[in-house]
Image (cartoon, coloured by chain):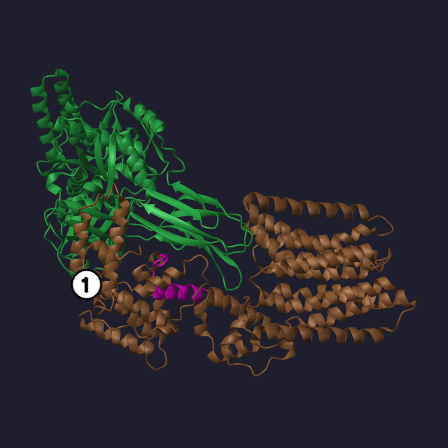
Chain colours: A brown, B green
Amino acid sequence: MSLRDPWKQLGIVPTDDGRTVKRAYARALKTIDVDADPGAFIRLREAMEAALSWGVRTPFFAEPEDGEWLAHPSDEMVAQSDCETIVDEESHDPLDFDPRPARMHSGDDRLESLRAELEQLLFGDLPPERIRIEAVGREILSHPALAAVDCLVEVEQWLMHAIASAMPRSDPLIEPATARFAWRSSGRDWKRSWALQHVLQRRRDLAFLADCDRPLAQHRVALNELRSPPRRRLSLFKLGLAGQVTDFLRLVEVEHPTIEHDFDPEALAWWRDTLAGPRLPADFWPAMIGVPIALSFCLWLLLAEKQGGAPSLALVYPFALAATFMAMLVDARLRGQARRRALAFPAGSRFRTLWPFAVVLALPPAAALLPDGLWTIFLATGAAAAGALLLLSRLWIVRSERSDKSRYFLPLLATILSVAIVVYAPPGQDLRMIAPLSGMCWVGLECGATIERCILGARKIMRDLAVAALLLILGTAALLLAHGFPKPHMPLWLLALAPVAVTAGQLGAPLFVPSRWPQLLARISWIALVIASNFGFAGFDYLYLGGALIALACAALRVAGALRMEWS
Amino acid sequence: MIVGIDLGTTNSAAAVWQDGKPVLIPNPLGDFLTPSAVAVAEDGSLLIGLAARERMVTDPASAKTLFKRTMGTSARFALGRGRYSSEELSSMVLRGLKADIEAYTGERIDRAVITVPAYFNDKQRKATRRAGELAGFAVERLVNEPTAAALAYGIHELDEESPFLVFDLGGGTFDVSIVEIFDGIIEVRSSAGNNRLGGEDFNTVLANLALQQIGRRDWKPALDPRLQEVLRAASERVRRQLTEQDETMFGFVWQDERYETVIAAAAFEEAAGALIDSLREPVVRALRDGGVRVEELSEIVMVGGATRMPIVRRAVTRMFGRFPSTNVHPDHAVALGAAVQGALQERDAALKEIRLTDVCPFTLGVESAEHLPGGGIRSGLFSPIIERNTVVPASRVEMFQTMRDGQRSVELGIYQGESRFVAENVKLGTVTIPVPPKRAGEISLQCRFSYDSSGLLEVDVTVPETGQARQLVIVDDDEQANGKDVARRRAELARLKLHPRDEAANAAVLERAKRCYEENIGERRTHVAALISGFETALDGQDPRRVSTARDEVVRALDEIEGERIL
């Protein structure tokens, strides 16, 4: 809108009389040639509209016109703001609005009484009666007075607001009203009001809810949990439930906001509170079983090599168990702290699977702790610093989820550290094998998101190149595997296969539509990877080979899935 | 002189501004309406109008109607030996009209205002403009049909202060406009419509109803063009008869067998219920966008042949709680309004104090994306820039930001439509502009849309950071309508000669008689055959007086057989 004074442009003194404004506009319009000078017309038109909206339609000069019932200006602005490019989705809480839509008079007594009855049913204190609500609603919808456009629009607006404000009581009205007013086609209109948006959202959400209610449905457990009265505490054996509820709540928030009306309010509040506080990770039990075993086994092997004799497993295992538990507690505290500061927590599953890799990365310091010369002290300091940084960075990553610098920084650090280890460690050291491995794992996992967005955002040709690169990596790996297999001693480079598999899997993941398969494959591949990395350097060639093969197969499956999606 | 042309789905008409008022141009048959039909006669000449429409039934391969419904698409139709697109077929009709106007005024005519349904999209408008150019017109302006009708109504009602509604249900399109007049300004406040709804849809309903009643639901007219035409002709006739009668006979001959069934108006009304219901949504939207209540409307102006149907009139009466206006002729108003617009364009002295402002009836915008709270990105959203029912010419600016870190270029898809998702809207083009790689959201783009009064959209994108700018004038992607191409196609079409004007009346009667022959069996058919051969003998004699008497006789006989000729 031009900043010039609209009154000056129209050549009149400020007034609240629309007629004067229009007369001035008409006079000015006749002096310009619209086709020759469209700019002059646009300026004049803007001046006229500004004069009308500042002078005539604002309460400063006069009461708002009661003719505004057809289009709520505020509604349009709300609908419009949804379409802004960058603005995050705003939630339009219907409760901010007066829940009872304004009364209107259609002049028909029967319609008025039906309307009053429906309002009583929807907003009254009586227990909800679905059948009665539906019957009254249908009678209103089939009332002959609705043949007149005026009455139809009035009833449509009223019903729309009533349904939107009285969820979930108004559910039985949604289908008949949608069919009667053809809301589905007009509902796609970007200019639709918040009430219509809400009603159509509710319609989709009801379908989703019905889907969730089927036996064996993915979110059924979480849904039942939120619909039943709240728990008092979450036992150690129900930690998985927290993950399910978190996922479900996130889905509901983003995609199906109206489902919150169906939850038990107390249960919802309890879960929100619980999920916000510190809690143990959802895969606490698998981690408590798997990680100490792997850790103690590695320690046992390393100690045997350094000290010339095997220590008692009974000594090592409790140590590993305690270390894992402590680490998990620290993790829970850090995450709880991050959540308490109301920081958005990034997509969860990737962070949960980071655990085993953190353990893998912790192996070098464990090995270096043993007195073995100057190099190992250097390595120990570096690696311990890296470990501390990693733990700290968990908090950092959470905090700066939107800025991606940490994502570049961490893999870079891990890679530099790995290179340093490879260069400086004395030959023959097992570290030499672990370091690049863990480095690659970190690159694969941490860069995953970045690579993912690069690939998805890239042009078609770049995506094709990424796919080609994946195929190349997998092909090379397969070739290496086929060549390396018959040799009596596992060549060093064969160990590179496992990280290659992880990286390939990570690269392939973004091309894959989210479903349960990639998650499952990712889990299998990390188990295989841990086995491969822990047993490989200890001389268990076939265990390594098996682990690497499985990890590679998982990666291949994910890539294949991605390709199918890409080319179908 | 700028002429006004109403290029309709079923019928077209032309008018000129003469002595301070618009005047309709008669065609060689003396009618003001010329059916929008094209046929190629045996000698290779072009038949336009009624003769071509009659041919649709006898020989659908050599004739084509209803091509306005596929305007702006790349569909081509076989006609005689050639294959023609909708715009080329339309240009043939326009050529016929041009010949009529030149014969009437005795002047060479090369400037025209052509009407289009308000809800025609950008592609359809461009195709209409090209059709005009192919016919040898300089198209001065494309005017929305309801706007033209409002002009024709409005220049007589300049003192009217309250807004009125134009309800334009034509053969293939439906438009609603809210128009307000003040101080000589005729201002369209809002338009809404459906460019796939019209009288032809009622014909389809009627044909299906008839097939159901005679127990032939297994026939699929959509798969058989000839059957479709036979049914369409019968439906058209029945639909018109139902305007005056409560029930009428639906009769047609198919494969030498006569089928008959009685259609009751009530049964038709019930079958057409869904169509009647779909008239309501555009009305509601136009009222809502115009910010007008039904009781504020001073008049309901009905335009378009299909509004003569009693069921439509009844539905309108129910919708608005009053009877619609009968002041304007539903078939003539649009052409008359187009002539008024032509005179406005020429700054005719009689219209010095009158201005018309129209709106852009659809929303124009770009594709955009948004961040989801969970961290993902949802793309394919539609961000409006020029909202529907903005007064044109208009110019609007919106700012957009980059979505990703290190983004090097921004591709803006330009769309037209009302859906929140671009996939359901019409794509008009794309603009790509390079941006310096920065963090997401740090780079802004300025996107300006300018829409002129003829409906041409111009898009300017600038990056304030670098000062780089890109401009895009939306021209069709698939057809480079450069001057040379138009000239070449015009030359190609010019090679097709129009059927001589002075023989048009004879050709029309002959074609009608041939159709009548096909539509009847038994004794009547023999009778028609005798009429045809008698008339052909008269034609061979080349004595104008004898020909005209024979023609009148044939017409009288045909009127007796099948009722009056319909347009």
Q: Residue at x 72, y 76 (%)?
A: A326
Query: Is residue B411 rendered to the left or right of residue B130?
Result: right
Residue at the far bottom in the pictured view: A232
Question: Who is closer to the viewer here, B269 or B93?
Answer: B93
Up/down of B220 relative to A412, above or below: above
Q: Is residue A267 above or below residue A49?
A: below
Predominant secondary structure, magenta span = helix
Q: Amino acid at mark 1?
A: Thr
**Where is residue A45 drawn, in percent x and y?**
25, 52
Depth check: give the residue in front, B306 or A450.
A450
Residue highlighted by disc 1? A15
Magenta stretch holds residue A192? yes
Which of the 4 quarters of the picture holds residue B8? top left
Range shown magenta: A187-207
Is residue B69 among the parts visible in the rendering?
yes
Taking the image as shown, residue B400 lies to the left or right of residue A314, namely left
Where does residue A75 sit, x and y in percent of width and height?
Answer: 33, 64
